[in-house]
Image: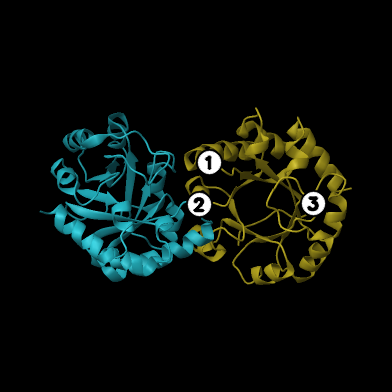
Chain colours: A cyan, B yellow
Amino acid sequence: MALLPRGPFLYAILDVDRLGERAPGPSAEALARGGAAIVQLRAKGVSDRRLYSLAEETRDGARRGGALFVVNDRPDVALMLGADGVHLGQDDLPPSAARRLLGPEVIVGFSTHSLDQLELSLRLPIDYVAVGPVYRTATKTDAEPVVGLDLVRRARALADRPLVAIGGIDRQRAPEVAAAGADGLAVIAALMDEPDLESAARAFVSGMRS
Amino acid sequence: MALLPRGPFLYAILDVDRLGERAPGPSAEALARGGAAIVQLRAKGVSDRRLYSLAEETRDGARRGGALFVVNDRPDVALMLGADGVHLGQDDLPPSAARRLLGPEVIVGFSTHSLDQLELSLRLPIDYVAVGPVYRTATKTDAEPVVGLDLVRRARALADRPLVAIGGIDRQRAPEVAAAGADGLAVIAALMDEPDLESAARAFVSGMRS
């Protein structure tokens, strides 16, 4: 399995819909310099050609800043661009097929939204399991029901691998999510909605560890 | 480069939106038994997980019937399922990146819609180049302007590799498209809209060669 950072760590999701006028490369670099251990590119609804160039820029920015780069949804893009990992949802390509394609060194992460999904996921060849949404979130309009800190605690008790919590996590809530057992805190809006991504990431990381 | 059939050949596109109640596996097999040399799966707007299972069924059906199996758009799905090829459009992942990922044996096809695009495509590591839409088509609502038989003839004069014509080709028009120099005739509606796919493919192939 691929090497993940030790928790608690910031898993920043660079959502193209929330970039506004900002370029993806410098934005990824800012998130990384602010302390994000992983930068994931999320770009829904763009053409694959556009996704490819966004991913290239995000990868280069994340690396300049010293973070790992993960592609959402797409094993082919991850492979083509030498990404550090791919994140898959329940409706994406099967994690076991992605693992065969990507080999043992590339991080494969997988989203779960219930105790049942979490338990099933622990039989899969994945490097980390994500649980959420922990809180109510405005990012995903088709979001699953809120699972709360309770599922994070239960997941921590069951999971034999790194746990990433996602969904509505902001600076104020970060300590209780880490205390519930999450290794990685995945954050979209609480970072992307700030004008200065590096400061936002730095403030988040410092709060998370306090 | 991967081996393509000798022309003229039928390149059947199994469009999931036009399957109705029919299952993809037996439908692909019927198209292949009717004489399609290639069966391509086209499944827009479904989840990747669904695409994966549709592709698995289509692959198995195409192989049972003796046809090559090509996946539209997605190099990862093609690799995961051991497909014979992938077909890429202008807005899909770059053909050169797909070639590096897929290696020399997997067919990579690429769509072009103008003489400029065709000329650029001949520098790419692709196994066949598609031109179209040759005629007006109801299949793609966002279709490019009709290029006509004229572009097929020009492409034939320029292209050093197999040429696939697409767009509004039916049984009646097939002979003139082949005469214009197309090796492969890509067909969606004229097959999928028929209740008996095997008979439709057989009638198409027999007309194409007459």
Q: Residues within 10 Å of mark 1 (few under 14, many from 20)?
A: many
Please name the residue that numbered disc 2 is placed on. Answer: A45
Residue holding disc 3 = B136
Pick whichever of labels 1 and 3 is earlier in the sequence.
Answer: 1
Q: Nearer the viewer, residue A145 or B171?
A: A145
Please indicate whether residue B31 sits to the left or right of residue A89 in the image.
Answer: right
Residue farthest toward the left in the current orientation of the protein? A210
Give left or right: position of A171 versus A103.
left
Q: Quadrant of the N terminus of chain B?
A: bottom right
Q: Residue at x 54, y 63 (%)?
A: B94
Query: In the displayed structure, would residue B184 be above or below residue A66?
Result: above
Q: Nearer the viewer, mark 3 or mark 2?
A: 2
- The amino acid beneath tag 2 is Gly
Q: Say which element carries label 2.
A: loop
Measured as percent of width and height from the top left, residue B140 is found at 69, 48
Compute the Cα span from label 2 to label 1. 17 Å
* Residue at screen point 59% across, 42% down: B43
Q: Which residue is mark 1?
A: B51
What's the chain of the residue with tag 1? B
**Residue B198: x %, y % from top left:** 75, 34
Residue drawn at (62%, 57%), measured in percent from left and top? Answer: B89
